[in-house]
Amino acid sequence: MKDKFYIIDYGKQTAELAEFQINMLKDAGAHVVVYLTDLPSVLMIQEIEQEDFLDHFANSLKDVN
């Protein structure tokens, strides 16, 4: 699963399932960007291209700083 890139967007009600999926993907060597949405029952996992992943990753770093 190396060189696979994912965006995961989840709400509060799906946090446990999302964390399981995130850990599973990371353990398999995938790269993951995670978003917490205000829609409580949403869990979306999308495989994306590396360029799109890098855009999301760069934006996630801006949100932290």
Image (cartoon, rainbow, N blue to C red):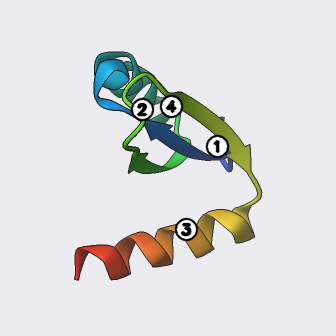
7 displayed left or right of 40: right
Q: Find disc 3 in the rendering and name its residue.
A: 56
Marked residue nearer the N-terminal end (1 or 4)? 1
Badge 4 amino acid: Leu
Disc 4 packing (10 Å; few <14; some 14–19; many ≥20):
some
Measured Cα–Cα span from mark 3 to mark 2? 16 Å
| Residue at image location 56% in from the left, 42% down from the top | 30
Which one is in front in this view, the residue at disc 4 or the one at disc 3?
3
- Indicate the secondary structure of the residue bearing disc 3: helix
In what quadrant of the picture does the N terminus appear? Answer: top right
Specify few, some or many for label 2: CA neighbours under 10 Å numbering under 14, 14-19, or 20 or more.
Answer: many
Q: Earlier in the sequence, mark 1 or mark 2?
A: 1
Determine which quarter of the picture holds residue 15.
Answer: top left
Residue 55's place in the image compared with 45, above or below, is below
Q: CA distance from mark 2 to mark 4?
A: 5 Å
Q: CA distance from mark 4 to mark 3?
A: 17 Å
Circle nearer the N terminus (4, 3) = 4
Instruction: Find residue 25 and name its label.
Output: 4
Which residue bears the numbered disc 2?
A: 22
Q: Which residue is mark 1?
A: 2
**Which mark is in front, 3 or 2?**
3
Given the image, on which type of amino acid does mark 3 rest? His
Amino acid type of the residue tagged 2 in the rendering: Ile
Which of pointers 1 and 3 lies earlier in the amino acid sequence?
1
Residues at discs 2 and 4 in contact (Cβ within 8 Å): yes
Query: Amino acid under label 1?
Result: Lys
Determine crowd level at label 3: few under 14, some 14-19, many 20+ residues with C-alpha closer than 10 A: some
Q: What is the C-alpha distance between the residues marked 1 and 4?
A: 10 Å
